[in-house]
Image (cartoon, rainbow, N blue to C red):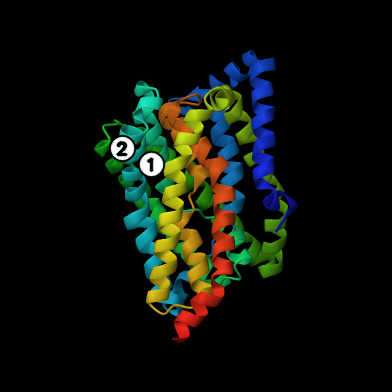
Amino acid sequence: MSFFERHLTLWVLACMLAGVVLGRLAPGLVATVAAWQIGSVNLAVAVLTGLMIGPMLLKVDFTALGRLRQAKRGIGVTLAVNWLVKPFSMALFAWLFLREGFAPWLPAEHIDAYIAGLILLAAAPCTAMVFVWSHLVRGDALFTLTQVALNDLIMLFAFAPIVALLLGMTDVHVPWSALLASVLLYLVVPLLAAQALRARALRRGGPAALERLQATAHPVSVAALLATLVLLFAFQGDALLTQPLVVALLAVPILVQITVNALLAYLANRALGERHEVAGPSALIGASNFFELAVATAIALFGLDSPAALATVVGVLIEVPAMLAVVAWVNRSRGWYLAAARA
């Protein structure tokens, strides 16, 4: 794991500070960047998102789908949690906490947008950092790769309908054209480009060439992620610093969702007799969110300085420490899991 990945939370905090400073010192520059739009798409965010997600998707190997049977119980559990539970549980938790429990302490005109941001956050499973989490719990690398490849394939077709359905249920109107454009720009194009580069590298130099390509592309992805965060915090930094209560309240349903889905996947794998090397990454994939896609889609649909974008940015702040806590729990419970499996 790289220095950047080990200290991602600190990097996020540094970007938050840099973004706030940029917004204060150069408001004209930030406003100019915000105005670089074609339709509902901000060009700076589109370019940075492609550079951020594309290198991550180089790791996705769709040929791994042929080995699904090797951990079919774990695959089934993770798919059920990712696509049948997680988006809908987040919508439920967001509604319970934000519209009901926390409504007196939140701006009433922003509650629908906050809920929309949280739904976008949970509508797609993570495809990049899960490789790090899987390594930290000594997970089965083949299972992780297979699950990520399958999730990416499903995401191409399921992300837009799930988002449209759940946002419609929460009375947030989202034009299909804008949503489909977001999926095309932020998911389909980077995935196709990454797979083309992957195939080219394998043809020319085999696995060694692919490893070199991934090593070269990784710093580009990191730099694009940091630049995106700086840009986001240039718009949202004041809101984060001046509304700490709102940030704390938005964090609650995110933490509850991560906890519930990690527990559900982990215990379901144990009940089905799956190996711990599969149950660990299954819990992590089931609980994690594709926050890069969520942030980009929230910006495209609602704007850079929208409450929905703020909710996804809170997700970025919460995701890493929360997932590290899940990693620690999975590792500490290994003995119990193995003993229970032998009983």
- From the image, which quarter does the C terminus lie in? bottom left
Out of 33 and 257, give the one closest to the viewer. Answer: 257
Could you tell me residue 229's position as x and y percent? 61, 35
User: On the image, numbered disc 1 is attached to which residue?
Assistant: 119
Could you tell me if residue 223 is visible in this image?
A: no
* Point 60% across, 44% down: residue: 52
Q: Is residue 131 left or right of residue 287?
A: right
Out of 173 and 212, give the one closest to the viewer. Answer: 173
Neighbor class of circle 1 (other Cα within 10 Å; few <14, some 14-19, many 20+) is many
The image quadrant that residue 116 belongs to is top left
Q: Mark 1 and mark 2: span between their CA atoms?
A: 7 Å
Could you tell me residue 290's position as x and y percent? 49, 48
User: On the image, numbered disc 2 is attached to which residue?
Assistant: 167
Q: Which residue in the rendered view is the most extreme toward the bottom?
A: 343
Checking the image for residue 286, the label placed there is none
SS at circle 2: helix
Residues at badges 1 and 2 in contact (C-beta under 8 Å)? Answer: yes
The three-letter code of the residue at mark 2 reads Leu
Could you tell me if residue 119 is visible in this image?
A: yes
On screen, residue 160 above or below 108: below
The three-letter code of the residue at mark 1 reads Ile
Could you tell me residue 321's position as x and y percent? 59, 49
Out of 242 and 212, give the one closest to the viewer. Answer: 242
* Point 39% across, 22% down: residue: 107
SS at circle 1: helix
Q: How many marks?
A: 2
The mark that comes first in sequence, 1 or 2, is 1
